[in-house]
Amino acid sequence: MTQVAVSPGASAPHEAGDPPVPAGHVRLTIDGVTVIAPKGELVIRTAERIGIAIPRFCDHPLLEPVGACRQCLVEVEMGGRPMPKPQAACTQTVADGMVVHSQLSSPVAEKAQRSNLEFLLLNHPLDCPICDKGGECPLQNQVLANGSATSRMRDPKRVFTKPIAVSSEILLDRERCVLCQRCTRFSDQIAGDKFIDLLERGSAQQIGINSAEPFQSYYSGNTIQICPVGALTSTAYRFRARPFDLVSTETVCEHCASGCAMRTDHRAGEVTRRLARIDPEVNEEWNCDKGRFAFPYVREGDRITRPMVRDADGALVPTSWTDAMSVAAGGLLAARDSGGVGVLTGGRLTVTDAYAYAKFARLALRTNDIDFRARQLSAEEAAFLAARVAGGTPESTGVSYAALEKASAVLLVALEPEEESPILFLRLRKASRRGVPVYSLGALATRSLAKMSGTLIGAVPGGEPFVLTALASDALAGAGVPDAESRNKLGALLRTQGAIVLVGERAAEVPGLLTAVDRLAERTGAALAWVPRRAGERGALDAGALGVVLPGGRPVSDPAARAEVERAWGASLPETPGRDTAGILAAVGIAEPDDVASPDRGPAGFADDHADEPARGLAGLLIGGVEISDLPDPAVALAAVASAGFVVSLEIRASAFTELADVVFPVAAAVEKSGAYVNWEGRIRPFAAALPQAGTLDEARILDTLGVEMDVDLYTQTPAAAAADMARLGVWTGARADTAVDHDEQPATHRRHAETIGLSPVINTERAAAGDGSAAGFVLASWRMNLDGGRGLDGEPHLAGTARPDVARLSAADAAVLGVRNGDLVAVRGPASSITLPVAITEMLDGVVWIPARIDGIGTPGRLGANVADRVQVVAAGDTGAAAGKGR
Amino acid sequence: MSFLDPVKGFGVTFATMFKPVVTEDYPKHPDQPAPRYHGRHQLNRHPDGLEKCVGCELCAWACPADAIFVEGADNTDEARFSPGERYGKNYQINYLRCIGCGLCIEACPTRSLTMTNEYELADDDRQRLIYTKDMLLAPLLPGMEQPPHPMRLGDEHDYYARGPELLRQARQAGPLAAEPVATKDTPSPTGAPS
């Protein structure tokens, strides 16, 4: 409402003194208050803006209006004539000259609302004492404020069996439901998982699911949060606490790089639940079930609680912090001087913890051998990250959640957003519903792509760089090229203002892909963003926990950049760019080459790429939060760590490395410390400690103390101190290194790769379609699922129950060649072993087989001995009875 | 001042010997407090022994001294402690904090929590003054069965609407599963009269 001076005769029908109505706005009166509102605004929102609260249950600002609960009835006059019946303020749009009387000024509206409340309570059980919503229930609040103290209802209430499990995590109590349809509308409009809907009619009307399809959505937890009564509750929080028991802390989710704002509620030193916090810039009001429910892992029995050192007999024994610190410092100093120490940080650190690691490596260990990547990686990726990603913010890159909604087109490369960054998917779906075209480069038209009304640009795994190179060139694709029409359209759209390319961390699995993405962005002018899976990767990159980059995106190879950091830190820095995770593990393993870099491990491990490293064995390792099964070849990594002379491990829970470590420090879990993550946008997401009294220390504090033992000051005692130290450095403004550092080597890799996958993706596709694809083997496509039995999901079996079933995806043509139908078992055979899964026939390229990248907690590439884009064999695996119904 | 002053006091003493005694012979003969005295709490049972407490925490909510701690849990078919979905798994009253105001028993929606006349709530140990559920639960009367056990008196609604009546009917039809014969081999719970 802008109050401006009135120009004479501006608004004739209104009394003098009224401000003029801006274009696209209307003037109306609510409860005697004249207000100017944009056309199309709902009366309930306009009233809200001027401080008039109209009660509501079904209305939600992010869902389309439905007018289901009838609680917001108001009296409306149009042109001096009252409408015959009270109107629902949540569906009534404003109009010029409208006069609205809410319950505050109209006895009719007041009576309508009171009567409706009584109506909603007819069948609502008065079981508030045992209802999880009791104490924070909109219906309860409304009745206490405005309802009648006694009930006129004398007849028995409608009863349903309560509660029924619509999924293993979500319980539905139909008696309590007021049929507002927030849950069904959310599932339909926001998540796109319409597994839950209204059934029956009249008084038997109820929410329900198709008995063959449980409510298997990654976003089902949001329906609990928006339910205005206790009809939807979670198995995890069932009867755990009351609102007044809970202490709430504003936190940020630690499970992926989306950076959702969360509210963590705890009681008596234990987290009882987590909710999505409202942040319009990032997650709006939603989060995914993993973020909501996967928090009990910190209470698991394998939590490390005391520092441990290896005693004379080789057993790990608990000891004091002081003792552990001096043993660790002594060992690391010795290792540093006899070959050096490598640092592996894992991708789950807060930005300040990652900064402490980065600083510790450079100052205390005097090396650049540090890497945050515990997954498939490449040198090309490190160069790409250093050149294009490090230090970027939504402002500097032009890519943010909000920008996606206004993009002219979004191209996803090596990214399956629903599985790898669920809230990014929700925003992309919102954008697509507003008309933003979404394209995905890959071999499969996934369900999430369908939900985004997206277009698949087909590319056989390994062939993506060729497609991107073609897109980057100004020449149009000819008629013979698959998806020619879509490609040309995308090519044109990418050249328009506001086009966005999102590239996932899986791009590192395909040589040349990141270079091709970078070239594409350069040639077309599209904005580019990198979307990692883990919450800490982006922050670790900005903090310099990578061999080729210092904090703020400063290239290690640039003397000016080094000098800047040296001035700030007051110490000299090592000049040689550091090795990556693969290189560090390989360098450790050099001591015993027979055990580690044996050639038969070739395709599975990354050791082969680095077998020709200079023979300078690392003598020690500092490992923090690396999960062994995340590494491409766990066996190689274990052997490497076992062969290292001195290993210091910083862990929340005992891991495979704990048994191999010489010193083990317990560290604080995300809920026990404050800090910040950097999400994929580059946005800093600070959070407070939910359980600060847990008595645990974060990594930055431990490393700071360890640094003091080693005669180095890190100034990272507290997250605030570390953040200030890091902020003093700022972001590098000088020249960045070129993306493709390995100019000489890259084409060779390319060539080698082109041979393995066939001549080119196009020809490859045609060959597969011609039927000989199965004979030559299938190209493996694979990625991690959102819920796939990672250790972060431990302790929450109900959540694990909503995971999607593991399937092998094949095209219809390939399935026909193999003679398998949906649900039949097929064996996917790699050099190392085979995996048997039920088939799900999917719209995808022929000659490609997709399987999850992690099955039963074991990484698929390591198990098969084949990486993405490698050839595997697929054969029908006999009896189908066991698998019937498993695939969808 | 009078010359009788030194012996006046003896007069008072002498006269008092013929008046009723106001002191109590505690602890040899403790007096019974008023029927509605706010003494130690008790968690009552349904006639078949199931607990009335549903773990709703309304008592804890009402408590002005934050003396009550309750944790609810889910009744399952295998282990049922109260009629309905929910029971109080953990129940503690801290008598160092309790001010005996009785707001908790007013808040209780199932009449589970009431106050007894027991007032001997003193100790020299803080820990012992935090009363746990087993100390607060009413003793098992004849005919009651130690939970967990299934609902013997009908469905959940019957318990609240017609509990005592149903018990009488059940008794007339024959001995309940929990009549003394059945409880002989199970040890008597804490606080229950043996």
Image: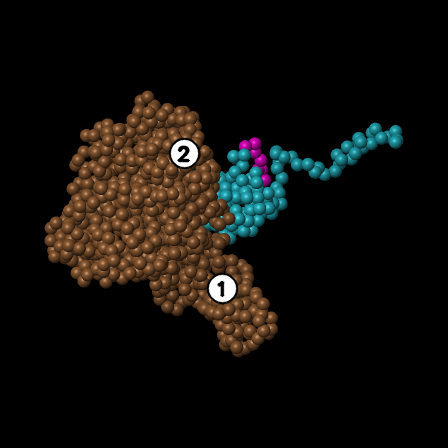
Nearer mark to the viewer, of 2 and 1: 2
- For mark 1, what is the residue? A45
Q: Residue at x 18, y 53 (%)?
A: A761
Q: Residue at coordinates 21% horizontally, 40% vertically from top-left?
A: A604
Which one is earlier in the sequence, the residue at label 2 or at label 1? 1
- Chain of the residue on which disc 2 is drawn: A
In the picture, the disc for residue B140 is: none
> What span is colored magenta in the figure?
B116-125
- Chain for colour cyan: B
**According to the image, label 2 marks what residue?**
A566
Numbered disc 2: secondary structure:
helix
Q: Position of residue A755 (x, y in %)?
A: 15, 47
The image shows residue A660 at horizontal and vertical percentages of: 30, 30
> Share a chain, discs 2 and 1?
yes
Most common secondary structure along the magenta stretch: loop
Mark 2: amino acid: Glu
Q: Is residue A641 left or right of residue B32?
A: left
Residue A128 placed where, x, y %?
47, 55
